[in-house]
Amino acid sequence: MADSALLRIGKKEYTLPTLVGTEGEQALDIRALRKESSHITYDEGYGNTGSCESKVTFIDGEKGILRYRGYPIEQLAEHSSFVETAYLVIYGELPTKEQRARFSQLLRDNANIHERMLHLFEGYPRDAHPMAILSAMINSLGCYYPQMSTNDHRSDLEHFDEAAAITISKVRTIAACSYRMSQGLPMMYPKHDLGYCENFLHMMFSEPYHEYQASPEVSRALNLILLLHADHEQNCSTSTVRMVASSGANLFASTAAGICALWGPLHGGANVAVIRMLEEIHAAGDDGSRFIRDAKEGVAGKRLMGFGHRVYKNYDPRAKIIGKACEDMLKSLGREDPCLDIARHLEEAALNDEYFIERKLYPNVDFYSGIMMRAIGIPLTMFTVMFSIGRMPGWIANWKEVASNPKGRIYRPRQIYQGPAKRDYVPVDQRG
Ligand code: CMC
């Protein structure tokens, strides 16, 4: 039985119930406070606010623990694949053989995009950013599947399995297509006999007369990158998906909003910023100390990209896995990337620096993922798109939680108004 908390404001006392999660996390339940008091709680950036109950992902940021549906990320990274993990994240259980085969088939059946949709790509300029195209296209899917995007959750949920498979499968086709178009290359249609990752690589890199063959190392690396990004509880993009979903919006619209939220450099866009930073250090022949110094001094808002996390105050377990996999992969492909050495050096320097130690700033998933994507051949402009493909199962699972909650309310935070007090309108000719 959870304890309750006592809140005293002036002479009045309020009893607040508490909530306890599966792993013992505790929360004050302030939902009823508004009925008895005019106070709201203030927490800019939601640093200490639980916006929902969820059964998808557990993170213990102090200990560096990440679990999808109870399974440690290390075990999934070692034994599972992206498609199997996507099923786990969305449906809550690891699939049986039959369920996995059915899910894979559904993904294969939905790999193509509507031919009319291909014309949409032609309207974009050659240098359009693939993230802008991706979000627009995912939202546009609703136009092609109106029965799944009625914005009535009960009816949209009747088509959930298909809508989820459409989104997961087509996001990869759309992503590859936007890259091909930006290069002035013809689109490569998906092939039915290829696995999820191999098919993506085929659509990215095959030529009309030259079929791209993904090596086992490369397809394993891509599987790992996507799997490690599959969900991460209430981050900026997932909360955005839930926020949009809470208004009753359909899966395509909600996940398209998630893509937009992911784009920024403090979130998914950090993987691009990290590579730019490492390349800049390489080009300058620097050892990275200038970046560390600028980040510490907050020069022009500079930060050490790929470092720090709102929740992890310990090593991000995904960064640990990906850093090691990155090294192994480069070794087995017989390649070298000076950025990896710079990253290792930067990490060591930062982890021994008082500023970073004091603030518990460790490498996050984006610190090494870009180096690994580069080794696969993914161009820089596609890095955040890869994050979107990986995060799709998490967004879908969170959309489903919101859509299936019969007691769910629209997400609608409060604010403290700090603008001008009431004043009277002055006609333009009297405004001085
Ligand atoms: N470099 C230098 N200082 C930093 C960094 C950094 N990367 N991150 C945080 N700090 C400092 C910050 O200036 C603040 O210092 P002070 O207390 O003196 O004002 C302190 O650490 C706490 O930072 P915060 O801004 O309160 O942290 P936050 O929880 O609001 O931000 C973050 C989290 C991830 C946005 C931030 O750490 C950051 O900007 N990191 C770089 C961008 C990045 O790598 N983002 C990817 C996140 S992981 C993938 C994902 O989920 O998207």
Image (spheres, rainbow, N blue to C red):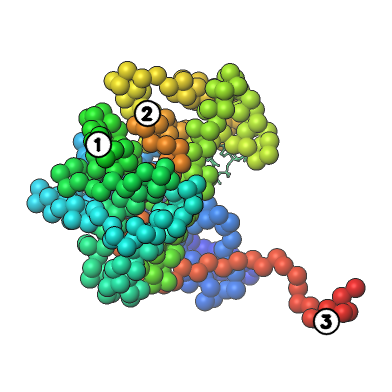
> What amino acid type is highlighted by mark number 2?
Ala
Residue 78 vertical placement versus 227 (above, below): above
Q: Residue at x 25, y 48 (%)?
A: 189
**Lower position in the chain sequence, tag 3 or tag 2:** 2
Q: Which residue is mark 3?
A: 427
Q: Residue at x 28, y 46 (%)?
A: 188
> What amino acid type is highlighted by mark number 1?
Tyr
Residue 248 in view:
yes
- Does the beta carbon at disc 2 come under 8 Å from ligand 1? no
Foreground label between 3 and 1: 1
Q: Which residue is mark 2?
A: 375
**How far, Cα to Cα, is label 1 from label 2?**
24 Å
> What amino acid type is highlighted by mark number 3?
Pro
Q: Residue at x 20, y 46 (%)?
A: 191
Packing grade of label 2 (10 A; few <14, some 14-19, many >=20) is some
Q: Toward the viewer: 192 or 285? A: 192
**Residues marked 3 and 1 touching at CB (< 8 Å):** no
Identify the secondary structure beneath mark 2: helix
Q: Which residue is mark 1?
A: 209
Q: Residue at x 46, y 68 (%)?
A: 411
Locate residue 226 relative to residue 110 in the image: left or right.
Answer: right
Q: Toward the viewer: 171 or 87? A: 171
**Lower position in the chain sequence, tag 1 or tag 2:** 1
Identify the secondary structure beneath mark 3: loop
Residue 194 vertical placement versus 25 (above, below): above
Q: Whereabouts is ligand 1, in terms of quadrant?
A: top right
Q: Toward the viewer: 153 or 7? A: 153
**Lower position in the chain sequence, tag 3 or tag 1:** 1
